[in-house]
Image (cartoon, helix red, strand yellow):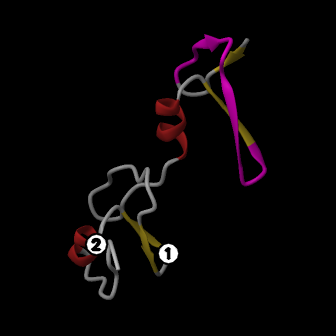
């Protein structure tokens, strides 16, 4: 059994995610998201979907990008 790096649970169905050449072990997607999902530069929510990016800043939506003064991004075409 493997041990989740976030909650410490030992689980026979744990899985690994490889990010930037480093393996991370989790027992749930919730723990994986907690460890690996980036945060919005405006509202600090974890970005689970595609998000938006401008000049190295990540946003969960266009509203948050606009709130930080970023122009020219859209949620949908």
57 part of magenta stretch: no
Please provide the residue range marked out in magenta: 7-22
The reply to whether dot 2 and dot 1 touch (C-beta < 8 Å) is: no
Displayed quadrant of residue 49: bottom left
Residue 56's label in the rendered image is: 1
In the rendered image of this protein, does residue 37 appear above or below residue 51?
above
Q: Mark 2 points at which residue?
A: 62
- How far apart are the alpha carbons under marks 2 and 1? 15 Å
Looking at this view, is 33 or 41 the one in front?
33
**Neighbour tally class for label 2: few under 14, some 14-19, many 20 plus, Cα within 10 Å:** some
| Secondary structure type for disc 2 | helix
Point out residue 9 in the picture as x, y percentages from the top left corner: 57, 14
Judged left or right of residue 3, residue 37 is: left
Looking at this view, is 13 or 10 the one in front?
13
Judged left or right of residue 36, residue 73 is: left
Give the foreground label among 2 and 1: 2
Placement of the C terminus among the 4 image quadrants? bottom left
In the rendered image of this protein, does residue 37 appear above or below residue 31?
below
Point out residue 19 in the picture as x, y percentages from the top left corner: 69, 49
Residue 32's label in the rendered image is: none
Q: Residue at x 43, y 50 (%)?
A: 48
20 part of magenta stretch: yes
Displayed quadrant of residue 25: top right
Judged left or right of residue 8, residue 49 is: left
**Neighbour tally class for label 1: few under 14, some 14-19, many 20 plus, Cα within 10 Å:** few
Q: Mark 2 vs mark 1: which is more N-terminal?
A: 1
Q: Residue at x 33, y 88 (%)?
A: 72
Placement of the N terminus among the 4 image quadrants? top right
Residue lying farthest to the front in this orientation: 77
| Secondary structure type for disc 1 | loop
Point out residue 33 in the picture as x, y percentages from the top left corner: 49, 40
């Amino acid at each position: 059994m493997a041990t989740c790096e976030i909650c410490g649970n030992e689980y026979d169905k744990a899985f690994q995610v490889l990010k930037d050449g480093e393996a991370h072990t989790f027992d749930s997607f919730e723990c994986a998201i907690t460890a690996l999902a980036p945060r919005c530069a405006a509202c600090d929510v974890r970005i689970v979907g595609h998000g938006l990016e401008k000049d190295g800043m990540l946003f969960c939506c266009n509203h948050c990008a606009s709130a930080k003064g970023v122009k020219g991004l859209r949620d949908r075409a």
